[in-house]
Amino acid sequence: MTPLSASDVRASFINTSLRERKAVTFPPDFDTLAWADLDYLGWRDPKLPDVGYVITHLEDGPAGIMLRKSAGQTRSRPQCAWCEDVTLPNDVLYFTAKRTGPSGRAGNTVATLVCANFECSSNVRKLPPLAYSGFDREAARLERIAKLELRSRTFVADLRCAE
């Protein structure tokens, strides 16, 4: 991911109000992030535990969204829709994001299951277990990285489709 400044991040949000953008609390390690190891930047707001943020790069530049943790509970342990990590090293939560434009102002949202603290980038970079003799673990890892980038970008881009 291309490194961004705090002002770039605030300006990238597509489904927030000006007040919500100004209230964003950045993660404590924002200034020391390993941008090269991120497929998207995601974090939970330290001041608002039910709020998360995701920033990714779309064709026209960085695009950020604000997500809210759903109040409901899943009946079984879910799988992240973005990294699809089957080893489940972390919790997965149901998040909703407001659509942009008039649709979002009318209350329309889109939901997804995502790693609770947005650990997807580190999950897909782990070498998968050997599935069979001759299995190319590195190729599988690179494919998982590419799919994570596609899924996260598609989710963010789809929020704008309802405008």
Image (cartoon, rainbow, N blue to C red):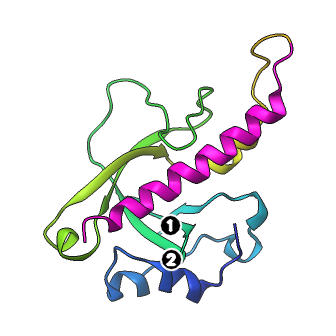
Q: Does 16 sit above or below residue 1?
A: below
Name the magenta segment's main secondary structure: helix
* Direction from residue 131 to residue 53 in the image, left or right: left
Q: Report the amino acid beneath label 1.
A: Pro
Q: Circle 2 sits in a helix, a strand or a loop, which is it?
A: loop
Give the percent coordinates (x, y) of residue 124.
69, 41
Q: Which residue in the structure is indicated by mark 2?
A: 25
Q: Residue furthest right?
A: 134
Q: Check if residue 148 falls in the magenta segment.
A: yes
Residue at image x 24%, y 76%? 101
Horizontal and vertical percent position of residue 33: 74, 68
The span shown in magenta is: 134-163
Verify CB contact (< 8 Å) between mark 1 and mark 2.
Answer: yes
* Residue beneath disc 1: 46
Residue in front for this viewpoint, 148 or 107:
148
Amino acid on which the number 2 mark rests in the picture: Thr
Q: Which of 108 and 95 lies nearest the eye of the viewer?
A: 108
Residue 80 rendering spot, x and y as whole percentages:
49, 38
Task: Tell me which numbered mark, 1 or 2, is placed earlier along the sequence.
Answer: 2
The image quadrant where one finds the C terminus is: bottom left
Is residue 87 visible from the viewing direction of this image?
yes
* Residue 41 in picture, x, y percent from top left: 60, 64
What residue do we see at 51% from left, 49% from top? 151
In this orientation, which residue lies closer to the viewer: 124 or 76? 124
Q: Secondary structure at mark 1?
A: loop
Q: Is residue 89 left or right of residue 125?
A: left
